Image (spheres, helix red, strand yellow):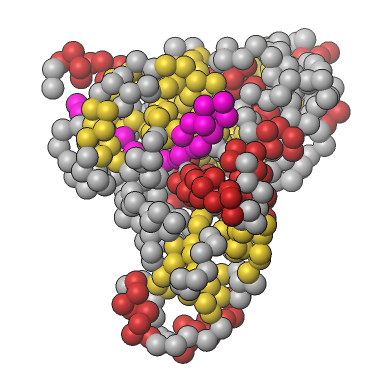
Amino acid sequence: MSTELLTELEQAVNIRRNFAIISHPDAGKTTLTEKLLLYGGAIHEAGAVKSRRDQRKVTSDWMAMEQQRGISITSTVLQFEYDGYQINLLDTPGHQDFSEDTYRTLAAADNAVMLIDAAKGLEPQTRKLFEVCKMRSLPIFTFINKLDRPGREPLELLDEIEQELGLKTYAMNYPIGMGDRFQGVYDRATQSIHLFERRSHGSKAALDTTIKLGDPRLEDLLDQDLYYQLKEELEILDEIAHDFDLAQVHAGKMTPIYFGSAMTNFGVELFLQSFLQHALKPESRHSSLGDIPPTYPDFTGFVFKLQANMDPKHRDRVAFVRVCTGKFEKDMTVSHARTGKNVRLSRPQKLFAQGRESLEEAYPGDVIGLNNPGVFAIGDTIYNGKALEYEGIPCFSPEMFAYLKNPNPSKFKQFHKGITQLREEGAVQIMYSTDDFRRDPILAAVGQLQFEVVQFRMLNEYGVETHLEPLSYNVARWVEGGWEALDKVGRLFNTITVKDSWNRPVLLFRNEWNLHQVLADHPKLILNSIAPVGSGLQPLDG
């Protein structure tokens, strides 16, 4: 590799930060995303999700259904610059029914920001997503939100994170009061207090008044009881808290904690500055050739998401590719690991929610959008130089199943196209009956909202009205060893066998009790709750 290219790659990697936000619905994820973009200069006014009817639609939610309901149900990518850094924010679905889309996005992230509601503390969805971060040893930065509303005691929240998630905590800043009496935060690194000033909806960047601890003016600016309470709690914190250890943060064993209010915009810039300083830059990734550093000279990347019809006018399909190594250049030709074919990457795009612009080059940590004429599947590796493949992205066990029926035979082509594209992008898992006479696809999802989104998109994007016929099963397991292993077992009771999009046998059970009963009767049968995906696999065509 030339010295010039190595220097270029090192410089590009050093200024890149890539992260995803994980949270429970309603913790304020979309609002925090908007405010980060506001500071990055990517937008000039932030629109809160549940605000007045005449306020702007939020930038990060692009699907009509998301804007109607005020929730995020797809992953988008938001790229912006701040203070010399290139930031890739992988916006994840905020709704629990779309956790699998979040799992896929976390496969492309280098860091996670865990957003917690100060009144509610840790919630079920946050715990679930934390487990995925833990599997990948992702560094986790915690933002405790909604300090301008009544909430739980800060020390209690820190203790809950330590006890329930097994993470060491380090409070980077500490709140002064809460709810109506919220007056600001104390920054432990600079020993200064950032005073909170209430502003409507925080649609503009917040003014930040900073005063050093010990400044005599603080006696007048802060309520006396809150000032003394702050001093007392800081003493407790200094006695019981762990020392800040960046190596432990990067290993996913310690989480820096920030307090603030995304809605009023307070503490967001303070968090962003500290996060950029401490977050992990793009690192080596595991492949069939071992761990590959980002400064490896040849371009490599993997597909972690597919999305159809981001631009309804053009009926496009976009593959989201995480650049892992080397330098990406427009119009380059790469090898496609799964098929062995060469693919020319024309019309690459820089993504910003629904808006996109042409892209000339990209570096490790960046996410690029590629036109996908049915070439890519989730988990695919593309590369130049020596053949390699990155680890695949698994499918998780769905809990709801329903036949999707097309009542209008004249719309067969549109129905088939819609199902194929929605399956490709992983909006829902698709399975089929083993009865050849039953051709209706079976939708397999984590929650009801996924079914609603499929029907909504089939109607709005493909012009096909559909009906659902629910199946009374809620547990799915993949058979290790495939059809051959299943044939050896013989007849099974209290279960039905279906096939997934890759023609692998999946057993559906009515409940966990039925599953345990079958396993007790057939001890040699090995069942998995995660589909056996080694790397990108080409699904069957219906």
Image quadrant occupied by the N terminus: top left
> Residue 185 appears at what percent x and percent y?
69, 24
Work out whether residue 220 or residue 282 is closer to the camera in this orientation and state it.
282
Q: Would you say 8 lies left or right of 277 here? A: left
- Quadrant hosting residue 319: top left
Asked if residue 388 shows in the view, the reply is: no
Asked if residue 313 lies in the magenta stretch, the reply is yes
Picture residue at 31% right of the left edge, 27% below the top: 345
> Residue 79 appears at what percent x and percent y?
49, 22
Asked if residue 257 lies in the magenta stretch, the reply is no
Work out whether residue 288 or residue 170 is closer to the camera in this orientation and state it.
288
- Quadrant hosting residue 506: bottom left
Picture residue at 38% right of the left edge, 59% below the top: 502
As displayed, is residue 205 above or below residue 1?
above
Total count of labels: 0
> Residue 176 appears at what percent x and percent y?
75, 27
Magenta-highlighted residues: 291-317
> Residue 423 appears at what percent x and percent y?
48, 49
Image quadrant occupied by the C terminus: bottom left
As displayed, is residue 197 above or below residue 304?
above
Asked if residue 328 shows in the view, the reply is: yes
Picture residue at 51% right of the left edge, 55% below the top: 429
